[in-house]
Image (cartoon, rainbow, N blue to C red):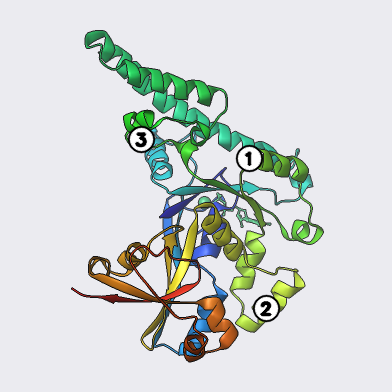
Amino acid sequence: MQIGLVGMPGSGKTTLFNLLTGNEKPTGPGGADEVYTGSAVVPDQRIDYLAQLYRPRKTTCARIEFKDIPGAKMEHSRARASRLLDEVRSATALVQVVRAFGKTTAMPDGPDPFSDLINYGSELLLADMDTLEKKLARFEDNACKKGDTSDQIALYRKILFALENEQPFGSISLSPAEEDLLNDQVFLTGKPLYAVVNIDEAQLQSGIYPRKEKVESWAAGKNLPLITVCAQVEMEISRLEPQEQIEFMKDYDLTESGLGRLARMVYDSLDLISFFTVGEDEVRAWTVRKGATAPQAASKIHSDISRGFIRAEVFHYDDLYRLGSGQKVKEAGQFRLEGKDYIVQDGDIISFRFNI
Ligand SMILES: Nc1nc2c(ncn2[C@@H]2O[C@H](COP(=O)(O)OP(=O)(O)O)[C@@H](O)[C@H]2O)c(=O)[nH]1
Ligand SMILES: [Mg+2]
């Protein structure tokens, strides 16, 4: 899973990337114009508590991979523009960074996060239309010769029609037969999309930024998850000592870091949950899709554990937290043995029994 940071040049993609992944890549107009990849720790208070309780030699948090993808510019060659588009195409989900920061007097019309937000949506639609039109042209050419691709052509036309009416690919309902015909083709407008409005210090304090109401109502209408982050301020805070960080967060009324809120948004919308393994050696968080069975969860750790799965010994984080020790959870009868059909729940603490 890799999440692409996309958006207009100067919107703060690289600043946000640095904040999320702890990198120090160059930002601003002089910033290098390349794709950066890095990973971010998913903040989870539960893992902090587990580490404190079990005092393991190693604590491993869940991670999310990000890549900072600069937008194609006029001066870029066609090949480079298409490489950048491929980077967008290969991302699991996209975070659109939208610029709200900057004093409005500095720019004649000021930053316009609303226009940026819709313009990027249109760019994605146009890129998908372009792909489809090329495919259609090829197919129609061939069809003249062979005449056996009419279903495919009808389907492409249906999708193109929807895109032309500003319906993203993800919102088109397709029959199983149509899904088969598409054969896992990737559409940019079919990817989960989130928006991060990058605000400045003054906006953080006032809670207002230009065209905020329009941005929010548009996002709500499109079911587009949206958060505001003050990337620059959080970046500066993240460089401080832990105690100072807490104080500054309080000063700015920040109850949760941008990374924490972004991670929650991603987990919620992609239906991801966490389970934990605990022990003297390691306390570790694992990420699975909601609905994963115990053997599917085990396969995250090792395919052998999944193949040789016998049973899962399960208790829940909330019970552990409430009762204070694994022993007490057992005594309270909250310790369960589950079979291969067990559906893993968010916050499960699991020990797998297996035989290979
Ligand atoms: N005031 C302010 N400036 C920011 C913020 N985020 C980014 N910038 C500045 O905006 C410029 C562009 O940021 P950058 O991350 O390079 O944008 P990118 O082109 O989207 O990667 C840089 O000079 C940043 O220092 C912010 O939240 N507040
Ligand atoms: Mg950049």
Q: Which residue is mark 1?
A: 117
Q: Which of the four quarters of the rendered structure image does ligand 1 lie in?
A: bottom right
Q: Which residue is mark 3?
A: 185
Q: Nearer the viewer, residue 201 or 159?
A: 159
Q: Earlier in the sequence, mark 3 or mark 2?
A: 3
As helix, strand or loop, the secondary structure at mark 2 comes to helix
The disc placed on residue 246 is 2
Q: Is the residue marked by circle 3 packed among few (<14), some (14-19), or many (20+) residues within 10 Å?
A: few
Find residue 287 and report its horizontal and vertical position in percent: 43, 64
Q: Is residue 45 visible?
A: yes
Q: Which of the two marks, 3 or 2, is nearer to us in this view?
A: 3
- Identify residue type, mark 1: Leu
- Identify residue type, mark 2: Ile
The quarter of the image holding the N terminus is bottom left
Find residue 113 and report its horizontal and vertical position in percent: 68, 43
Answer with the quarter of the image where residue 342 lies.
bottom left
As helix, strand or loop, the secondary structure at mark 3 comes to loop
